[in-house]
Amino acid sequence: MKLLYLTHSRIPTQKAHGLQVMVMCEAFAAAGAEVSLVVPDKRNFTGEDPFAYYGVTKNFSITRLPISDFGSRWQMFNALFFWLDVWSFARALRRCSAVHRSDVLYTRDYPLLFALPRARAVVLELHSIPKRGWLFNRALARTTHVVAITQALKDDLVALGVDPNKITVAPDGVNVRLFEHQIMQQEARQRLGLPHEGALALYVGALGGWKGTETLVAAAEGLAEPQVALVGADAAEVPVLSKKYPYAHFVAYLPYRELPRVLAAADLLVLPNTARQEISARYTSPLKLFAYMASGKPIICSDVPSIREVLDDSSALFFKSDDPADLREKLRYALAHKDEMAARAKRALELVQHYTWDKRAEQILTFLG
């Protein structure tokens, strides 16, 4: 099977979707597909080879198609230049011979569907439902298969009129092998510049928006123990955030390959998603969630449906979403009930064995027939 994965994303990128694309290409190839990733030739701000940056096996090829790349050259008119670059990439796809020779055309970017020829399978992986309803509905009509990352997302697609037999639910995953080697906590904390003594509750990922990090920062105020640390800020923002919120620790973004070492620094791991936005409450399948589970550390998370699809009360401690006071109390509870939290962590580690990238790829390829 020749599978062409098409993405308009910059590869590599610090954003989580870039990692997800790369590890899924690796997993599809490991499952037996002949995989090629086709990306626009955008400026590489990291300067690193994508395979090294993400720590994935080089078992698939990457093809870069020339585009206008206005978005890399100008910071103004972001929306305009984004769509100009999408249009430029779509034009390049129409001329790409590999697109016409593939058995499966796979993408997360629904606007690209309008540039694709007919294939045995045209697959759209969805992580949310766009606001541009009329354009999105026209794009859906051009697909043969849809991959939804949560059941709630599938339910909403069915409500829009999509045939349920055309949709499979495949949450995100993790490479559990990354967490097989034990890393000493003190070594990890020293590397991150975090306190060597005392219990530490850790969050990893982007700050702000629907991630709910403002709830965690607010919970840290007045909390003697555990101390709270957030890893993932822009390097330039770290001193600003540290001054504004002296009761929390902030660490700059690190590549995904460093994640096992980062999580090793923690006693507790926090996933504080907001319930105020649908993408967080119902649609997200956070990569950090599965990494948290694979680390074997106790998890405290926001009580939202998207996370409840994966974890339950036997595998995590839930707090009322968007409620700093309740999160603060749950952090104190977790420290006071270490055996109970260890049992939850053990159950989460058992559950995550079903959420590997390899199993996800096999499920999707089986769905494609």
Image (spheres, rainbow, N blue to C red):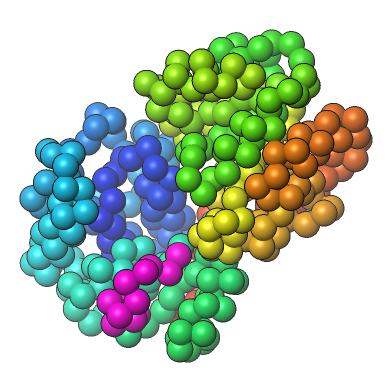
Magenta residues, start to end: 128-140
Magenta span includes 300? no
> Residue 43 lies in what quarter of the image?
top left
Residue 121 visible in the shown view: no
Q: How many marks?
A: 0
Magenta span includes 132? yes
Q: Residue 100 or 186: which is nearer the viewer?
A: 186
Tell me the quadrant of the picture where the N terminus can be found: bottom left
x and y, in percent, of residue 301 in the image: 70, 46
Q: Residue 218 or 369: which is nearer the viewer?
A: 218
x and y, in percent, of residue 260 in the image: 59, 31
Residue at 36 percent of width and 33 percent of height? 52
Q: In the image, 38: left or right of 220?
A: left
> Residue 237 lies in what quarter of the image?
top left
Residue 21 visible in the shown view: yes
Residue at 51 percent of width and 85 percent of height? 159
x and y, in percent, of residue 10 in the image: 26, 46
Residue at 28 percent of width and 57 percent of height? 7
Dominant secondary structure of the residues highlighted in magenta in the image? helix
Residue at 21 percent of width and 53 percent of height? 79
x and y, in percent, of residue 175 in the image: 56, 45
